[in-house]
Amino acid sequence: MPHSIVLVVIGVSMLGLCLSMALVPLLSELIEILEGMEKYDPDQISDVTSGLFNAMFNLGNLLAPLTAGILNDAHGYVYTCDFMMVSAAIYSLFFYFTMIFGRKLY
């Protein structure tokens, strides 16, 4: 892709919009999974969900810059962006086929 400030602005805007659309349904998914396990008291489910969500979100906030920095030092900026994009796309496909498509089969 060409180096362009317009592409950067579009990419960052898409990231912000897509991140908010991904995080909101995630909480309901976590609550549904924990309720299905029947392991936790119904009064504790929101507390456990909040703890899991915040722990994993902040773990990602910790590891993503470290991973990107290591890749940037080793291979450069363009490779790092491409790698992060491809890994996010693979994760999205994996999530779709395991969580969303699998649910439609039932």
Image (tube, rainbow, N blue to C red):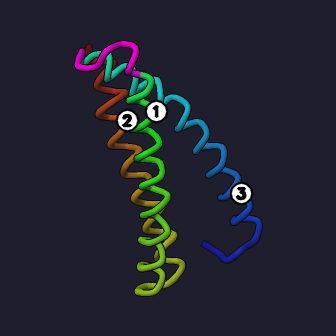
Residue range in magenta is 38-45
- List x then y, in percent, for residue 24: 55, 31
The vertical placement of 35 against 20, above or below, is: above
- List x then y, in percent, for residue 16: 65, 49
> Can you say which quadrant of the picture contains the N terminus?
bottom right
The vertical placement of 102 against 59, above or below, is: above
What residue did someone put label 1 on?
50
In the rendered structure, find residue 10 and report the number of the disc placed on it: 3
Mark 2 vs mark 1: in front: 1
What residue did someone put label 2 on?
96
How far apart in space, not on screen, are marks 1 and 3 (Cα)? Answer: 31 Å
- List x then y, in percent, for residue 71: 42, 78
Q: Nearer the viewer, residue 60 or 20?
A: 60
Q: Secondary structure at mark 2?
A: helix
When asked about the image quadrant of residue 36, the answer is top left
Q: Earlier in the sequence, mark 1 or mark 3?
A: 3
Q: Mark 2 touching mark 3, by CB under 8 A?
A: no
Which residue: 32% across, 43% down? 94
At label 3, the amino acid type is Ile
Which residue: 43% across, 27% down? 47
> Can you say which quadrant of the picture contains the C terminus?
top left
